Amino acid sequence: MNLDLQYRGRSGVRDGTVRLAPNLARPLVAFDGGLRDPLLFREGMAALYAAVTGDARRRVEQNPEQTAAKREVYREFLRLRGGEEEAARRGGQQAAQAAQAQAQAQAQADTPADLDAQFSAAHRRYWAARRGWAAELSSGDPAMFRALVPCDPIVTVAADAVFFEGFSKDLSAAGCLRVDRDRFTGAQSASPGTTNVDYSAALHDQLEGLRSYRPGGLRIDPEGVELRREEATVREERIALPDGWLAGLGQLAASAQLPAALIRLAPAAVARILAWLQRHRERAGPRAIRAELTPGAAPVLVLEPWGLCVEAEGVWGGERRTIRVWGRRRLAALARVLPVAEHVEVRLLGSGLPSWWIAKLPGMRFSLGLSGWSANAWSAGKNTGDGSAGAALDLLAGLEPPDRRVLEQVAAALARERALTLDALIARAGGQERPVQAALWQLAKGGLVLSDEADRLYRWRPILPPDLGHIVDEPHPERVGAQEILQSGALRIVRQERLGALHVRVGTLDGVKTFELGVDPDGVIRQGRCDCSWFHRGGIRRGPCRHLLALRLLHPALDG
């Protein structure tokens, strides 16, 4: 997929103001306001950059000799590290004594009169070299920088907030920084909408210069940023987005609409997880974060295989559950925001399913969405051969394909109002909730809608220029099979009952094949049992089989 970009000038930071050049190939988007908390904005943008440039994919060497050599080097590294740690422990006291002696010697020595001047000169030399390297990387070798950031960040200016979004190059992590409009000062002139902004390694380095004691601002200026004479004309770029980029980002965005187990962690608890993962490397599985949810007790996150337990805040009020998520080292993107965060909310959809880690800052919120595994299967879609990966979440949600008329009504209402609640959308689209939810799910998958859980709003946010034609997918084979089962009339429900919060159905096909389905109060498929080949290969993590899906769709209203 190719994305056309047009920029006038380049983004940069000047006099504390972050000046971003928007994509002129899209409708006009502009913003101008002062930053109340430049430090918080800097840390949030650093976390977004870490999420976008992250790549947790496992690389397999093609040359067996090189692989064996690297393994031997790694074993030697482990032996040396063990010796270094022991030496560090023995030498700790000696180092402290030496530092104390050095401090006393410096206190007695005369301080050079030009110490500040020497420091300033060295500081200037360092930053001149660093900016030169960044400029060479972004301008002299743009292909290398595009390997780090496959697509420029997406910025959405809304009436109550400004959103910055990005998607990792391994298609497994999405980052979103929301800044409330009340965190800006001044007149805040704005033209709402969604666009891309010019981003480079030089801009990332310049953002590191923001300080809390210096006034700062944010300006999205279509007229050009730091315009130089040689850049008086519009600079055009065409980016070849990776296969599955839009599908993966859309799947993660849509997953935010699904009900989830909510866990609240203190920043120190998340920092403990990151510190442990940085110091330790597992040599064998399991490699998951296991959430133990016990009624009447605080939720506990367990790092496997070490068994490190991190306790969450509050008391779990639901049923007993155990949820495992993988690809935990991608959580390192949260490191920059933890020192300034008030708390971290974790939304777990289920074992092997996407999860959301949301750091709440004063007036800001950084959301990190992770696919179930580092090697993201949710964005693969039809490239997997059986078409299962890209539609697994669709099948788990249990939603019927959206009605075209409702889809257009919901899209038109959101494009006009830019943000609406679910109740408002239902009122505008005929008064039925399920068709509207199916339309919102499809619009989010297509990159047109952002689910804002904090305000219970659905926002119009087209990642690419809006086009309803490309978001109506071909039906999944299991969904087609479920419709065929329903049309045959051979499916019968032999038992229905409530087991805790789950509505359980047992069905039979032709009086021979029996299968069982468990659905939660939100209509999402949580459990299942079937003896077909689809279920045998992956359970419901790949999405329910046609038999379970037909049992779910036989009578959509599950009220017990």
Image: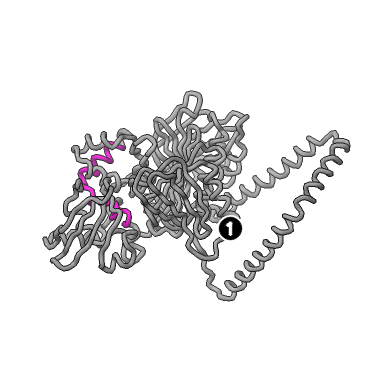
Q: Nearer the viewer, residue 448 or 77?
A: 77
In the orientation shown, which residue stands out farthest toward the right? 109
Say above or below: 347 vs 490.
Answer: above
Instruction: Indicate the secondary structure of the residue bearing disc 1.
Output: loop
Q: How many labels, in total?
A: 1
Is residue 393 magenta-colored? yes
For the question of whether residue 225 can be seen, the reply is yes
In the rendered image, residue 312, in percent from the top left (x then y), is placed at 47, 44
Is residue 392 magenta-colored? yes
- What residue lies at 52% left-to-right and 38% top-to-bottom? 341
Q: Is residue 289 left or right of residue 130?
A: left
Which amino acid type is marked by label 1? His
In the rendered image, residue 260, in percent from the top left (x then y), is placed at 36, 46
- What residue lies at 37% left-to-right and 39% top-to-bottom? 453
Q: Is residue 426 left or right of residue 177?
A: left
In the orientation shown, which residue stands out farthest toward the top? 187
In the rendered image, residue 421, in percent from the top left (x then y), is placed at 30, 35
- What residue lies at 39% left-to-right and 48% top-to-bottom? 294
Q: Nearer the viewer, residue 139 or 124?
A: 124
Which residue is denoted by mark 1 in the rendering? Answer: 280
Tell me the crowding category of disc 1: few under 14, some 14 to 19, or many 20 or more residues within 10 angstroms, Cα based: few
Q: Quadrant of residue 509?
A: bottom left
Considering the whole magenta stretch, tell me its main secondary structure. Answer: helix
Residue range in magenta is: 391-414
In the orientation shown, which residue stands out farthest toward the left? 489
> Could you tell me which quadrant the N terminus lies in?
bottom left
Q: Is residue 305 left or right of residue 246?
A: right
